Every structure is written in structure tokens, then in C-alpha cells.
Image (spheres, helix red, strand yellow):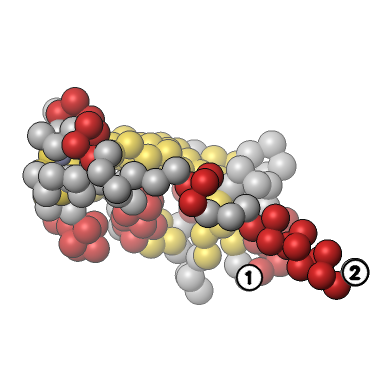
Amino acid sequence: MQKVKLPHQVDPVKSAVKRSDYQGVIASGDMERLLGAVVNCDEWVDAEVQFKKDAQGLTVFHGHLSTQVTLICQRCNGEFNQPLNVDFCYSPVQGANEIDMLPEAYDPVEVDDHGNVDLLQLLEDELIIGLPIVPLHAEEACPIGEKDMTFGKIEPEQERPNPFAVLKELKRDQE
Ligand SMILES: [Zn+2]
């Protein structure tokens, strides 16, 4: 199957009128910031994007991204492969007023003066946000398992005073 590359720039309103529906790929080589955040990324990111008008007449585009990245385990420093799957749902806006009016399910995305959205950059952001904050092997796959990590373990409940208890003390002092 031939891989159709997603356009980097789109006019979401026009695309919604045409009910454009992309099933294609993004070359990970075009996403330098993502490549900088991982050891390696599959050559292609599978991408589906649908443009439409919702029941209120708002322009929406939503879809799914999936690829595989190689990350460094923060427990053992070994490399491991992790699938990366991201769902997104955006509505184009111009200015803060329009952001306030959006339903919560829609993420606002600002269009430029020509009504275009930088789709590549937007979806790259989604992938970066989708990366684990602390990459770790699955426990059973990590040479340094959870059992070796028990040293220095503290019980947070006991070690740290409850912040509300401190507030209570302060209040009592004032009375
Ligand atoms: Zn590990």
C-alpha cells in the first residue's frame, strides 16, 4: 500500500466543508523536536484525521496517531520500544473570545491570517505530550525490577505532615 503523506498546512474550515478524511502517514524525519525527545522513532507515524462540522456548526478535526518510539528506561538505563498512540480533537479559533465559547471536548487551535493550521507541528506536539514523563520498562521486562527499588523507600503519609494539619495549627494560633 502506498503511503499518503498528510499535508503540513491545512485550512480546517475548507477541509470541513469538503468533509476531508485523511488516512496517511507523517514522516518522523519531519518532526525534529520529537526525534530530539526519543532515542528513535519509526520512520512513519500512522495518522488519521477527519474534518467535519459538528451539530452546532463548529469546525472540528479529530483523529488518531500511532507509531513506535525507542526510549531509555529511567530505572536501568536500557533502551526499550514503546508504542505511542494519541487521540486528538481540535476546533480552529481566532482570538480568546472564541476559545471561551468552545465545548470542553475540543482543544482550541489558532489559525494563521490565511485560515491555515500547521498540522504537522500540531500533531508533533500531540506525540511529544503523549510520551511518558518517566519512561520505564514494563516491570517484568526491566533487568532492575521493582524488588530492587525498595531501598530508601519512604511512606509519604508518615514522613510528611499533612499540609491541612499545619493550616489548622496556624488557625488555632490566631484564635
Ligand atoms: Zn528498565
Comes first in the chain, label 2 or label 1: 1
The N terminus: image quadrant: top left
x then y, percent, for residue 113: 50, 74
SS at mark 2 in the image: loop
**In the image, farthest residue toward the top:** 140
Q: Which residue is mark 1?
A: 95
Instruction: Look at label 1 and name its amino acid.
Output: Gly
Q: Which residue is mark 2?
A: 175
Judged left or right of residue 165, residue 87 is: left
Disc 1 residue crowd, few under 14, some 14–19, many 20+, Cα 10 Å: few
**In the image, farthest residue toward the right:** 175
Is residue 23 depicted above or below 95 in this figure? above
Disc 2 from disc 1: Cα separation: 48 Å
Instruction: Look at label 2 and name its amino acid.
Output: Glu
x then y, percent, for residue 145: 18, 33
Is residue 22 depicted above or below 108 in this figure? above
The disc at residue 47 is none
Disc 2 residue crowd, few under 14, some 14–19, many 20+, Cα 10 Å: few
User: Which of the pair 20/157 is nearer the observer?
Assistant: 157
Judged left or right of residue 3, residue 21 is: right
Q: Residue at x 53, y 54 (%)?
A: 160
Q: Is residue 127 visible?
A: no
Q: Residue at x 33, y 36 (%)?
A: 85
x then y, percent, for residue 70: 14, 44
The C terminus: image quadrant: bottom right
x then y, percent, for residue 173: 82, 70
Q: Residue at x 63, y 39 (%)?
A: 54
Q: Residue at x 44, y 43 (%)?
A: 155
SS at mark 1 in the image: loop
Quarter of image, ligand 1: top left
